[in-house]
Amino acid sequence: MEEKTTQMPPLKVIARIHTAFPTKFGIPRQSGLVESLRAEIVFEPEYRVAEAVRGLEAFSHIWLIWQFSEAVRESWSPTVRPPRLGGNTRVGVFATRSPFRPNALGLSSVKLERIELDPARGPVLHVLGADLLDGTPIFDIKPYLPYVDAHPDASEGFTARTQTHRLAVECPDELWALVPPEDREALLGVLENDPRPSYQHDPERVYGMEFAGLEVRFSVDGERLTIRQVGPAGRR
């Protein structure tokens, strides 16, 4: 029997998210790990219609369906090497949340803090806990439904062996003072969750990440992360 083929229409970008991360390094590995991270979702001009989000304010969390815009490629591999397994163990791509997928689609659950009706930008969603790069295109937004979306007894697969650990963060007072007060809790959460690749353990290495207009340089020795430098991003 001949299979019927259906031409799929292209996905439409309905919005873009604006976060504190202009580069991939430092972004939490999952949504919700650092709930104090603030972000804005701004709809594309065609979708800046207040009626489109009517009733959404009644939900505390939403799902975002988005594109790994930095990982789009023509080819794909049936296996990937998750960083949390040391970067050497291969598992099936569909058993991971790797960005290197046939369709480079991401799924994140974030907390909806409020909806702002901006005269110029239309409805703007203010969210917490996003794990997305600044400017990431969003294809769809759906309400999170706890009675069907939450499964507290679900098995964790290989991630049960790779639970995130928290580092003790140390920073001289004069450097911490350079971080705006409204960004300190979020930055601390990002650093506590250890943004390094899991296979890098050199205590002498100094890492740099951009966060909310700042460049933060740090080193890690064992379970202690020390901030070495804080300054405007793009300047050395």
Image (cartoon, grey):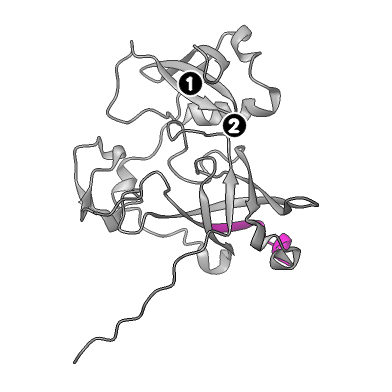
User: Residue at the location (28% across, 86% down)?
Assistant: 4
**Cα–Cα span, label 1 and label 2:** 15 Å
Q: Nearer the viewer, residue 111 or 40?
A: 40
| Front one among 157 and 34 | 34
Q: How many marks?
A: 2
Dot 2 alpha-carbon crowd within 10 angstroms: few under 14, some 14 to 19, many 20 or more: many
Q: Is residue 1 above or below residue 15?
A: below
Q: Is residue 188 left or right of residue 219?
A: right
> Element at badge 1?
strand
**Residue corresponding to mark 1:** 168
Q: Quadrant of the N terminus?
A: bottom left
Q: Position of residue 183 (x, y in %)?
A: 64, 28
- Give the residue at mark 2: 186
Return the residue nearer the eye: 140 or 6: 6
Badge 1 or badge 2: first in the primary sequence:
1
**In this picture, residue 52 sits left or right of residue 144:** right
Q: Secondary structure at mark 2?
A: helix
Mark 1 vs mark 2, foreground winner is: 2
Residue 95 in percent (x, y) is at 29, 56
Residue 74 percent across, percent down from the top left:
28, 54
Instruction: State whether residue 200 is above or below residue 229.
Output: below
Q: Amino acid at mark 1?
A: Ala
Callout 2 amino acid: Ala
Residue at (47%, 24%) from the top-left corner?
Answer: 209
Q: Which residue is at a point 63% across and 25% down the rendered structure image? A: 184
Dot 1 surroundings within 10 Å: few (below 14), some, or many (20 or more)? Answer: some
Instruction: Determine whether, in the image, residue 231 is placed left or right of residue 198.
Output: right
Give the image location of residue 109, x and y in percent: 53, 54
Magenta residue check for 190: no
Q: Which residues are magenta?
A: 55-64
Q: Residue at x 37, y 27 (%)?
A: 196
